[in-house]
Amino acid sequence: MYRVLVTQHAKEDLLNNLIYLAYEKKNPQAVVSVEKDFYDTLDKLSYAAGTFRLIGGQFNKFGSRKILFVNMHNYYLIYHIVNNQVIVDRMYHVLQNPKNIK
Amino acid sequence: MIVTKPADFRMNQKEFFQKAYEGEPVIISRPRNENVVIISVDEFNRMQFAKRMNAYCEGLTDLKQKATEMEENDNLSEKDLMKFYKSFLQFMKQNKDRLFSPLTEEEMLEELEEARKDAEAGKLYSPDQIREEMRALFGV
């Protein structure tokens, strides 16, 4: 089992997306659903973080990995593993990255 | 910059429109100083963008100042924290267009590097801490 921790940036990414859904889309159900998906994905990371492949290209230097949200939302988390800790660096929507990250 | 009277403008409308389109503002003077300016759409968009960026920078400076004050103050109450978050939410709401634009690979690498610095500095949160904060903010 890994201990999952989230950086300030990733926390703000989640917050930004929830604000967007709440204020712009005025969709409280989506807020609940995306937030739940975020925690479910963190849960999955706690036992399966090592199974996802490393990101290629220029991102390789960070030793980062990527996991898509587990419940169908088009978001993904970028994380890395240090000893038995999983550190979630950022959260992105697939459309935010032109190449959908390697 | 061209200044003209309404009558002249009417006579040479096409020419003035072309000049405005090419980047030269046309001022039409009217009685009681109720003057108007004709500019191209590009110029208008540039002005709007500059206005938005200006407001964004001002908001960001205020927010940074608040954050610094909060960092220096050891006796933070939950009320202070909520107050800061409210201003943060307000700021985010006003600037969502800028914040949700697609990123280039370089920008993304830069962001990841910043996140790594965060991690190294120990600015990390457990899922439970995040859950609590989001619950307080969104009431879900």
Image (cartoon, coloured by chain):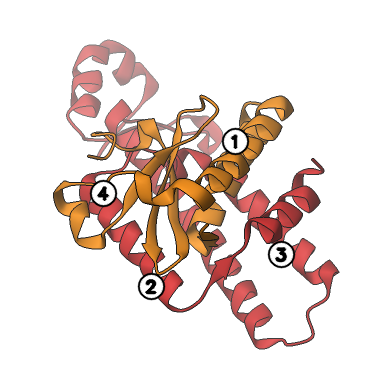
Look at the image and give the colour of chain B.
Answer: red
Image point (60%, 65%), residue name: B125
Residue B97 image position (x, y, % from top left): 47, 38
In this view, the residue farthest toward the front is: A1
Chain under disc 1: A
Image point (59%, 66%), residue name: B63
Q: Which class describes the residues within 10 Å of circle 1: few (<14), some (14-19), or many (20+)?
A: some
Cα gap from disc 1 to disc 4, whole angstroms: 22 Å
Residue B119 image position (x, y, % from top left): 44, 70
Image point (37%, 51%), residue name: A50
Question: Which label's residue is closer to the chain start, 3 or 2?
Answer: 3
Which residue in the protein does label 4 denote?
A54
Side of B78 relative to B85 (left or right): right
Are the residues under badges 4 and 3 in a single subunit? no
Amino acid on which disc 3 is placed: Phe
Nearest to the eye among marks 1 and 3: give it: 1
Amino acid on which disc 4 is placed: Leu
Location of residue B29 with respect to B14 vertically, above or below:
below
Q: Which chain is orange?
A: A
Q: Which mark is residue A37?
A: 1
Nearest to the eye among marks 4 and 3: give it: 4
Amino acid on which disc 2 is placed: Lys
Cα gap from disc 4 to disc 3, whole angstroms: 37 Å
Q: Which mark is residue B84?
A: 3
Q: Which class describes the residues within 10 Å of circle 2: few (<14), some (14-19), or many (20+)?
A: some
Are the residues under badges 1 and 4 in a single subunit? yes
Residue A31 image position (x, y, % from top left): 67, 34
Nearest to the eye among marks 2 and 4: give it: 4
